[in-house]
Image (cartoon, grey):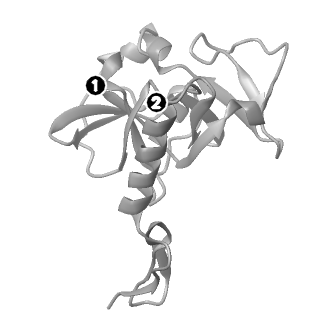
Amino acid sequence: MTEIVNETNPADRVVRASDGRKHTRLREFQAQLVERMQAAQRSGFVQLSQLGVMIGGSRYLLDLREAGEIVSVGTLSSVPLTRDWYKGLSNIRGNLTSVVDLSRFLGSELTEVNPSCRIVAFAPALMFNAGLLVSQVFGLRNLNDMTLLDGDVAIREWLPRRFSDQDGHIWSELSLSTLVRDQDFLHIAL
């Protein structure tokens, strides 16, 4: 049995499952995040608002104009004779979407799929039907609240800048529009 614990603010509704654990409704969180992303895109601060995600053990910032839908990781259909960082295909709203484990692509460990993992699809404007497997979605981050780390040399062309937040966490800017032109990223076959 499920009972609603708090209804004072519908956006903050918490549900108590039959086992006594509290859960925030995932759909409501995702709807709020989409609304905030759309509002940020409409405002004059598009360049300052970024989507914060965790990939492997590192934090990344995605431009809202390049990030598309955020979905839970469902069934991934494996594709034979592909690199281990190519996780396979996912059906996202009737579209087959390639899913990439960027952590593994960068040489780190494979991302273990757990309940906090999501797929962040690339925006339709990029005309590249793919998504990244992310360990966690942090929500919107404002670059005004971060410090650009001067003197950093870009590790890769699609990781142009790094920032430090007020808690000392390091965030790498991830350009999806540049990533989709990277020849190593495009070459998924063994």
Front-most of residues 83 and 37: 37
| Quadrant (top left/top right/bottom left/bottom right) for the N terminus | bottom left
The residue to which callout 2 is attached is 42
Compared across the picture, whether 127 is left or right of 94 comes to: right
Give residue 163's position: percent from left, percent from top: 75, 28
Compared across the picture, whether 108 is left or right of 95 comes to: right
The residue to which callout 1 is attached is 129
Q: Nearer the viewer, mark 1 or mark 2?
A: 2
Q: Is residue 189 visible?
A: no
Q: Residue furthest front?
A: 43
Give residue 45's position: percent from left, percent from top: 59, 27
Q: Amino acid at mark 1?
A: Asn
Whole-number angstrom distance, CA of label 1 to CA of label 2? 24 Å
Q: Amino acid at mark 2?
A: Arg
Quadrant hosting residue 17: bottom left
Quadrant hosting residue 100: top left
Label 2, residues with CA under 10 Å away: few <14, some 14-19, many ≥20: few
Front-most of residues 39 and 85: 39
Q: Which mark identifies residue 142?
A: none
Badge 1 or badge 2: first in the primary sequence:
2
Give residue 9's position: percent from left, percent from top: 49, 72
Residue drawn 70% across the image and 30% down it? 143
Residue drawn 45% across the image and 35% down it? 101
Front-most of residues 169 and 146: 146
Front-most of residues 34 and 115: 34
Q: Is residue 42 visible?
A: yes
146 above or below 54?
A: above
Q: Secondary structure at mark 1?
A: loop
Label 1, residues with CA under 10 Å away: few <14, some 14-19, many ≥20: some
Q: Secondary structure at mark 2?
A: helix
